[in-house]
Image (cartoon, rainbow, N blue to C red):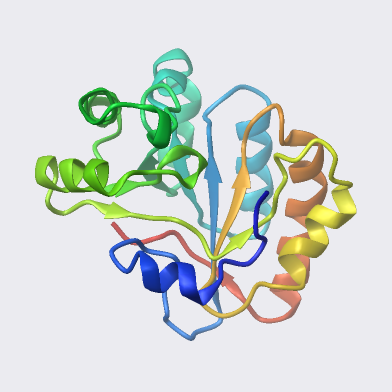
């Protein structure tokens, strides 16, 4: 189960997490999880360049290690970087010390104060440990979920998820992964084109 638009109650329950930017300007903050990988991440970079869009990439440390050339291209194109753990750990099923060590292992490669927990699942105790290790850390969630990871979802439904729900200052989540690619590659360019015509700008999350 997942929610396309994050409910206000959830944001109130976890006020220490960043769900949207609250800037109330014609800005959209497009984010990508799980890369960098061949083919899919370069596709994303090419589409973003076509729309003069900056985004935020929450990278898995092991993928950065495996594909340093793609990682360097993400940086060279001026996008923001976020930590997504080294091995895409699910916080609810991982002990706190292992979670912290995995975060720090990725941090050695990423050097960023942005972090997004894989699956959006992190224990309060884990968040506390991460903030103790890196006091300037910003734990970034999302306000709009494309659900491109859902293998049963039609590409058009993925597009509808973001077009019908996204507004000023929203953080939108896509994935630059093989699993999500068929839906993301359909939805992303069409969404950027639509939003551009609506006068939105695409910005990276500040860090």
Residue drawn at x 74%, y 35% is 181
Give the percent coordinates (x, y) of residue 136. Answer: 16, 54
Residue at 50% x, 26% y: name it. Answer: 70
Q: How many labels does the image show?
A: 0
Q: Is residue 167 left or right of residue 36?
A: right
Examine the rendered structure and indicate whether residue 128 appears above or below residue 59.
Answer: below
The image quadrant of residue 81 is: top left
Coordinates of residue 59 in the picture (x, y in percent)? 44, 34
Front-most of residues 102 and 48: 102
Residue farthest top in this picture: 66
Residue 175: image x %, image y %?
Answer: 62, 41
Quick one: which residue is furthest to the bottom in this view?
24
Residue closer to the observer: 67 or 1:
1
Residue at left offset 65%, top offset 59%: 3
Left or right side of 1 for 10: left
Give above or below for 39 relative to 113: above
Q: Quadrant of residue 193?
A: bottom right
Q: In this view, does 105 lie to the left or right of 13?
A: left
How far across and how far down the image is residue 187, in percent?
79, 52
In the rendered view of the protein, which quadrant contains the C terminus?
bottom left
Residue 163 lies left or right of residue 116; in this view the side is right
Identity of the residue drawn at 22% across and 51% down: 137
């Amino acid at each position: 189960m997942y929610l396309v638009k994050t409910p206000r109650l959830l944001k109130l329950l976890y006020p220490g997490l960043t769900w949207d930017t609250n800037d109330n300007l014609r800005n959209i903050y497009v984010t990508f999880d799980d890369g960098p990988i061949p083919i899919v991440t370069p596709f994303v970079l090419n589409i973003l360049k076509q729309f003069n869009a900056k985004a935020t990439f929450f990278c898995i440390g092991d993928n950065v290690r495996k594909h340093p050339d793609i990682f360097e291209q993400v940086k060279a194109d001026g996008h923001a970087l976020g930590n997504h753990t080294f091995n895409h750990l699910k916080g609810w099923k991982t002990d706190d010390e292992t979670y912290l060590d995995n975060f720090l292992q990725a941090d050695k490669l990423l050097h960023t104060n942005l972090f997004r927990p894989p699956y959006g699942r992190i224990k309060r105790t884990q968040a506390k440990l991460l903030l103790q290790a890196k006091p300037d850390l910003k734990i970034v969630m999302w306000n709009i979920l494309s659900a491109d990871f859902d293998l049963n979802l039609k590409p058009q439904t993925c597009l509808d998820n973001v077009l019908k729900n996204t507004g000023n200052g929203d953080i939108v989540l896509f994935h630059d992964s093989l699993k999500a690619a068929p839906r993301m590659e359909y939805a992303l360019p069409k969404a950027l084109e639509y939003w551009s015509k609506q006068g939105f700008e695409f910005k990276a999350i500040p860090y």
